Image (cartoon, rainbow, N blue to C red):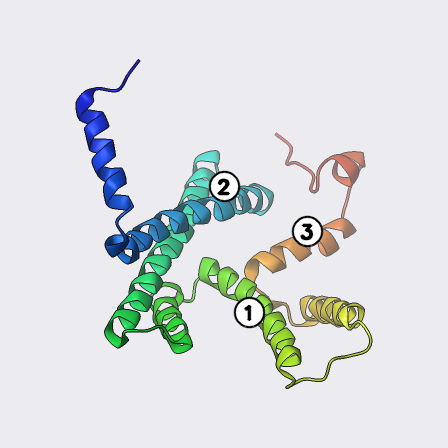
Amino acid sequence: MAAPPQLRALLQAVNKLLRQRRYHAALAVIKGFRNGAVYGVKIRAPHALVMTFLFRSGSLREKLQAILKATYTHSRNLACFVFAYKSLHALQSHVQGETHQMHTFLAAFIGGLLLFGENNNINSQINMYLTSRVLFALCRLGVEKGYLPALKWDPFPLHTAVIWGLVLWLFEYHRPTLQPSLQSSMTYLYEDSNVWHDISDFLIFNKSRPSK
């Protein structure tokens, strides 16, 4: 079934607008908002689903509400951050007539402060995710620029051993310093595996179900 003439005309007008280079910066901000919202849902929804049903108590309704709230918060914050970052970056470039590396840092600095500056579980997870990757990238950049020596041996095994040694030491002796979701995961792995009563909570369930 062919689209009505009015709809075809509208789509042609929209597509013509989207191809206009003069509006590219503004349209990129809008699409950035769209991509941030979609990516936030793709990343948070599966994570929230798994973590909620594994570790959260409560009714099905409460669990679903928690999943939707976490997904909405992550998606909204990421969409707004992309919108703010691209807007501020474009504004700086427009004002100065050219693009500088500092524009990127300043735009992301302000956007991060505004959108991810609140200390909550979701922002904490996102920031810790970025922290590890930024540190890795800065080490590689330091080697690339000659600020750090290029090792003749692969440091990854040693790094791995130190990280796993530290995280288990922190879990066993300084647990409150770890992020709550990491505590829950490690409790499931290392503490819940110490307790069972019969075959049901040894192999089938993690914990025995209460008697009715």
Label 2 and label 3: CA atoms lie apart by: 18 Å
| Rendered residue at 44%/45% (across/down) | 41
Residue placed at 40% from the left, 48% from the top? Answer: 35
Q: Compared to 31, does 155 lie above or below?
A: below
* Residue 201 picture location, percent across and down: 74, 39
| Rendered position, 164 above or below 43 | below
Q: CA distance from mark 1 to mark 2?
A: 32 Å
Say above or below: 102 vs 15.
Answer: below
**Nearer to us in this view, 93 or 186:** 93
| Rendered image: mark on residue 188 | 3
Mark 3 vs mark 1, CA separation in Å: 25 Å
Q: As rendered, which of 154 and 164 lies closer to the eye?
A: 154
Q: Are there few (<14), some (14-19), or many (20+) residues within 10 Å of tag 1?
A: few
Residue type marked 1: Thr
**Which labelled disc corresponds to residue 58?**
2
Who's the residue at 61% across and 55% down the image?
A: 184
